[in-house]
Image: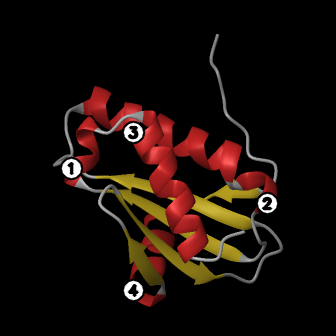
Amino acid sequence: MELVMHFNNTDGIKKDPEFRRIYRSGKSMADRNLVVYKMKNKKEKSRIGISISKKVGKAHVRNKLRRYIKEAYRLNIDPYVKGGYDYIFIARVNSSDASYHDIEKSIKYLAKKAKMV
């Protein structure tokens, strides 16, 4: 049985040109574990993308981090997120040994800094 996490107020960013547009034109904020890019979109809902480089670690490490980011976002940000923005979360190399609570703390800090909620 596949477990799928659904966001109520957020859609996903999937296509490479969308990621590139946000990297090029968006505003970035960072802490020691994550970087977030923020850019206004012309939609009612916000959208989220997650990017984790192979430099961070092997596939199981990258997948664990992706799950941590999605879950921390779903629980702490999604219910309160402002509509009309695209957000891309990028895991930094030193986040490879971060716990869920470290990622959650980073997400909360960046959400406040980026005025997501």
- Circle number at residue 94: 1
Mark 2, residue position: 80
- Secondary structure, mark 1, is helix
Separation (CA) of disc 3 from disc 2: 22 Å
Q: Are marks 1 and 2 in contact (CB under 8 Å)?
A: no
> Mark 4 falls on what kind of element?
helix
- Residue 99: x, y in percent? 37, 34
Q: Are marks 4 and 2 in contact (CB under 8 Å)?
A: no
Label 3, on which residue? 65
Point out the frontmost of discs 4 and 3: 3
Say few, some or many: other residues with alpha carbon within 10 Å of mark 1 (under 14 / 14 to 19 / 20 or more): few
- Report the Cα–Cα distance between label 1 and label 2: 28 Å
Q: Residue at x 38, y 33 (%)?
A: 63
Disc on the earlier residue, 4 or 3: 4
Q: Amino acid at mark 1?
A: Asn
* Amino acid type at image mark 3: Leu
Of the image marks 4 and 2, the number of the one nearer the N terminus = 4
Asked where in the image residue 51 lies, by quadrant, the reply is bottom left
- Relative to residue 42, is residue 2 drawn left or right? left
Q: Are marks 1 and 3 in contact (CB under 8 Å)?
A: no
For marks 4 and 1 on the same chain, the one whose residue lies earlier in the sequence: 4
Residue 20 in sight = no
**How far apart are the two marked residues, 4 and 2, measured between alpha carbons?**
27 Å
Q: Residue visible at 45% across and 60% down?
A: 89
Residue located farthest toward the top when viewing the structure as drawn: 1
SS type, badge 3: helix
**Relative depth, front residue between 9 and 102:** 102
Q: Is residue 117 above or below residue 52?
A: below
Residue 68 in picture, x, y percent from top left: 48, 37
User: x, y percentage for residue 76?
Assistant: 67, 49
- The amino acid on which the numbered mark 4 sits, given as a three-letter code, is Arg
